[in-house]
Amino acid sequence: MSDTSTFEPKIVAFVCNWCTYLGADLAGTSRLEYPANVRIVRLPCTGRIDFNLLIKAFEMQADAVLVSGCHPGDCHYTSGNFHARRRWMLFRDLLDLLGFDMRRIHFSWISAAEGHKFQQTIAEITQKTRELGPYKLYEGKPAAYPQFPESVMPLGDFSTEALLRETARKLLSEGTVQVVIGYGERGPIFVSKAEDADKLVWNRNCLTNLTAYLKRKEIKALGKAAIVVKGCDERALMVLEQESQIEREKLHVIGMACEGLGLPKCAGCNVRQPRFADEVIGEAKPAEPIDHYAALDVLMAMSSEERMGFWTEEFDRCQRCYACRQVCPLCYCEQCLVDKNRPQEIDTSPTRKGNFAWQITRAFHQAGRCVGCGECTRVCPAGIDLWALNLMLERSAEKNFDYKAGMEKSALTLIGSYSARDKEEFIR
Amino acid sequence: MSEIITQDLLRACVGEWLAAGKSVAGPKQVSWNRVLYAHLEKPEELLLDLEAHPVNSIKEFFFPKHEKLYGYKIEGNDVRLMETAEALPEQVVLGGRPCDAAALPILDHVFNWDYKDSQYNARRAAATIVTIACTTHDDACFCSSVGLGPAAERGSDVILLPFGDGSYEVRCLTEKGKSLFAGKTTQSDKTAPVYAGPEHKIDPAKVGAFARDHFEDTFWKEQTLACLGCGVCACNCPTCHCFDIVDEGNAAGGYRARNWDSCQYPAFTQHASGHNPRGSQSNRQRQRVFHKFLIYPEKFGEVLCTGCGNCTRNCPAGLGILRIATEISHG
């Protein structure tokens, strides 16, 4: 980078067809000169601009990325840009946590009448990027593992096992349900006979979020189900209902009051008592509240370089076993993006580039949806700190939109809704 | 008479090997709740006296999760192929368990029965395997059921037998092993105690025979309903060796690589037409049992399993080979 004078940055601009593209057109027909460093990719609407495209651009050696569309209120499709604005807000926070250089990601509203603004924006971004030098994937040494705050791991008592068995027996013998999805001695079990109800257990090994089974066709085929949930699992049920993935009235929910399974996620748990179950077994005392986001502060106190070093070390261990996806109740796509291979949108190779692309995709698809059940982190064989990605998006949703997934029954989904008053200080 | 080394001296050896430019791999704490076999940068990182088996296996150092096969460059109508294999440093794989080491001769068959896989063989040739015998076992261990044990020597160049006081009896089994430890050990008249392995849990022949006779059987569905379809079992299995071939790059150039794959993924058998001969998760689980206890044994005369218990220990849904094989053996 010794000769920044000869370095010409590549800038990829993802623009909407109706405003910014016409703005660029106007700049052209008005003979306004702007640097030739920009490559414009025209898309129907900013609402269509998938975050994966931004990552892809960086993967393909873009030095900076611009996303630009119609001013609020001007969207050709009424609200595409409002939806986009919400997503960018969350996405920026995720990229920041990962240690991306936020000086290389730009957002703007440029209308069809703003040829000048297009010219100026491109000139500014080009100049700024020229000063920053070429963008590179992190090549430094991994950062030292951060000192996360010590977490308490509360462990409840599990004296309600007999009651659970009794409940299951009754549901099965009376024919209310055909199967009870619950925990057995060695993991999840599916009890369809009343006499097998004693195979159900309730103890500290009841870790799996069983709602992940509701998406599986072989489980659906078992008939009307009762499902055993803890308060944390129940939040996932609520999101699944919001997203029309389950018919709640066709499901019998057995809520287990839970004072902790001895996991870090159990500290400060505010859903120990299930709230929307058809029946709740036991009673749980509320937990001492804690600062859930303290661990994020530790990461955000690091420099962005160090953060990327930390994530590089974490993601380098990823084996692409996809356990994080498979155990997640909210990863229910019939075909995951990463499994699409015509064309291959995300590298399936467990390289640094491929793993970043996969982990960003997985995390961001949970934005405003993740209920913090922590299953992805628990099952990751490589021990990747996936919780931190989820937590960042949770904090972003809470801070910017006062939203927490799976807490309120009547809430709209975060990404599927918008407000005209959403923040936009980061947009030019 | 026996040869002895203390843990401190062993660590000092690691330091020497690293300083000499060798690559050294061994058990390492990679996060608050995970120990993996990984490349070591400092001798202090080596974890000894482990109570449980690390999550992964040592196959990674011979058959990496991502490996370049060759590169290509396209200029006009001209396509050029290029070697991508990099020079391999000498490698010491230290602290694996007998169940990890025993998987290597098993993998050797696969990578050499027809096509001789030069990259796999080069990694094998460059490596010395220093195994540490087990003193404990857990519920998932079943090495004794597949003909191995806490001090099985198969696949190792050196086996270290713990005295339990921070020192090991060093048994060099090959020339490679002897030269690695030449001059590093002291002589003693003690010999290390032999520890009891896990009790006999499954009968591999019975599992194979059951598989042969029960291709279509409700057993598979009943036993595998809880399977969520991830690849934890295959990725961390010392003997699972299926891979996918991918091209990484663009129209100007790039490389062809192989990545670990797993029979538990639907895309593993998906046809271009959309048809999938193993359309359900129970079919895919059945395949894993078949390959380990019927298909591989028919071809190579031994089971494709070393009883390490990784699939059972790490399964998010509490399944694993041991659970299914136990059902068959005692059911």
Image: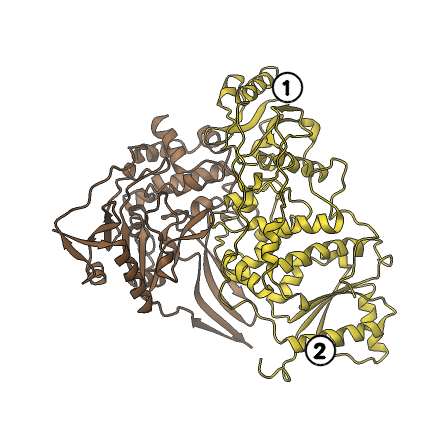
Chain colours: A yellow, B brown
Where is residue A118? Give x, y as percent.
Answer: 80, 72
Foreground residue among B292 and A287: A287
Disc 2 versus disc 1: distance between alpha carbons? 68 Å
Whether residue B210 is situated above or below residue A172 in the rendered picture: below
Mark 2: which secondary structure? helix
Where is residue A401? Give x, y as percent.
Answer: 75, 49
Where is residue B192? Give x, y as percent.
Answer: 19, 45
Q: Which residue is mark 2?
A: A127
Report the residue that reaches farthest toward the top: A174
Whether residue B186 is situated above or below residue A366 in the rendered picture: below
| Earlier-in-chain disc, 2 versus 1 | 2
Classed neighbour count for the residue bearing mark 1: other residues with Cα under 10 Å, few (<14), some (14–19), many (≥20): some
Q: What is the chain letter for disc 2?
A: A
Write down the quadrant of residue B196 in the picture: top left
Q: Which residue is mark 1?
A: A176
Q: Quadrant of the C terminus of chain B?
A: top left
